[in-house]
Image: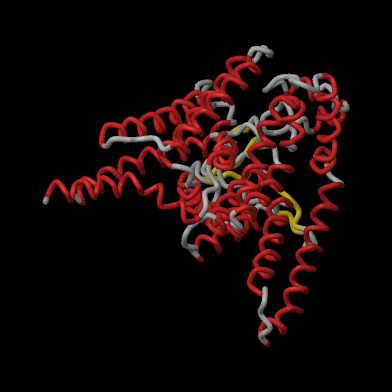
Amino acid sequence: MNSRLHIHKLFQEFFGYLIVLMLLMDSRVIYGSLTTTPSWFNYLIFAGIGAGTMGSIAYTFITKKITLSSKQAHFFMVLAVTAVYLSLYIFCHHSKSYTIKLLLALILLSCYHIIIEKGEATLLLKYRNIMTGIAVISLSFWLLASVLHVLKPTGTVLSTWAGTALPKKVDAYYYLYFETQELEIPILHIASFRNTAIFTEAPMASFNFSIALLTELYIAPRKNKFNIVVLIIAILTTLSTTGYCVLALILIQKYLKDSKGKKSLFHILSIPLIVVGVISAVVVIFVMVRDKMGTGSGEARLDDFRVCFLAWKDYPIMGCGLGNGGYIQSYMSRARYIANRGLSNSPGLVLAEGGLYLTVIYTGAFLRAIYRSFRYKMKDYLSFIFLFLLIYTITMIPFIYLTFYILIWFAFGVNKKKDSIETLEPLLNYFTKYQKNQI
């Protein structure tokens, strides 16, 4: 019996990690933005998600009987209506292959979440595990190579993720770590490479490390201090304003939560230290923001709101079409277009490319998650949702598969803590049935 259960769990873990690996590969890793990247790279990611989802569902159907609860049936009805709703959008635009692939990925991830996960965010826990490993590797290379210069590059690659039409030369270390961006450290005025790990830029590295940290803090049933420390250090070494804001908010939320209703001498004496720490963090963030606003990157972030709004005004209902970034870029100034044509504003991008038609879907997922968190007083989930909303607002991540999965969890999951036993129900039923047969 134990061996059969072990094999079943092994297969499910394999398919789950396959999906998570594809989510990672779609999160702007540098492997997908090289001049040597094959044209079928993105299709391989989509195929991996399909194989992981269909393999997991098929294996589950083969090994044991699956019965859908009324709640799951309701979610499938909502998914069907959403698929039809999004299909109507596809027929209104010309970029059908791109949007069809996104729709199919959304359906696959939703089916996995409803049937296999039953409303839980188990893929995020797996994602946290992988990102913690990446953090350990990247910190080692960042310290030994980028800071101490003990290690030398083992090669160079040409990255097409440069914000311009020209590829950028990037030093690589065993293809496990890449020096993609250099930045002057605020206050210290020391130039250093940012820890971008295997990602195209620091904001995306910070985004992925932050999602893993938020998962560890607010979703994981048991907190792992090693994971927390490693992920925090990784975020700090990206020198990303977004990551620093997230860490500051986590610190404030954690202190307010721990000190609520406590009047001990320790908490009273710790107040000045916390105040000094928060003020110091605010000063560092302010300096970073001020310095960034004086650069092309900072000015581009502000300009994103303008160009996205102007593009949306032309097509307010259906948008200009997913993947039609060229239309949005047409509203950029010539200097901005030459220097940095990339976007970094998810809500603006959804509104400009998808119009109010798609914005409703994104907004609905956020509102449902917030409503359930308030209704069932799940403060940890609420913290995750609001911090993810902050990251989502100032990072361009609306159409990557990881964002899709998180929004799917918002739309169909965010279960009450006591409902988590539902994920073990099929396994418990199988165990009970086996015992009866033995008797």
> Picture quarter containing residue 81?
top right
Q: Which residue lies furthest to the bottom in this view?
A: 265
Q: In this view, does 296 lie above or below 431?
A: above
Answer left or right for 59 relative to 47. Answer: left
Q: In this view, does 410 lie above or below 272?
A: above
**Percent position of residue 218, x then y:** 56, 57
**Percent position of residue 114, x then y:** 46, 37
Which residue: 49% across, 30% down? Answer: 76
Which residue: 68% across, 51% down? Answer: 386
Q: Residue furthest front?
A: 70
**Percent position of residue 162, x then y:** 70, 33
Answer left or right for 68 relative to 204. Answer: left
Which residue: 71% across, 31% down? Answer: 359
Is residue 105 shown to the viewer in this render? yes
Which residue: 66% across, 36% down? Answer: 364
> Picture quarter containing residue 246?
bottom right
Answer left or right for 178 relative to 356. Answer: left
Of 57 and 415, nearer the camera is: 415
Q: How many marks?
A: 0
Q: In this view, does 381 lie above or below 22?
A: below
Is residue 29 shown to the viewer in this render? no
Of 347 and 429, nearer the camera is: 429
> Picture quarter containing residue 306?
top right
Q: In this view, does 68 lie above or below 102?
A: below
Of 56 and 435, nearer the camera is: 435
Of 363 and 141, nearer the camera is: 363
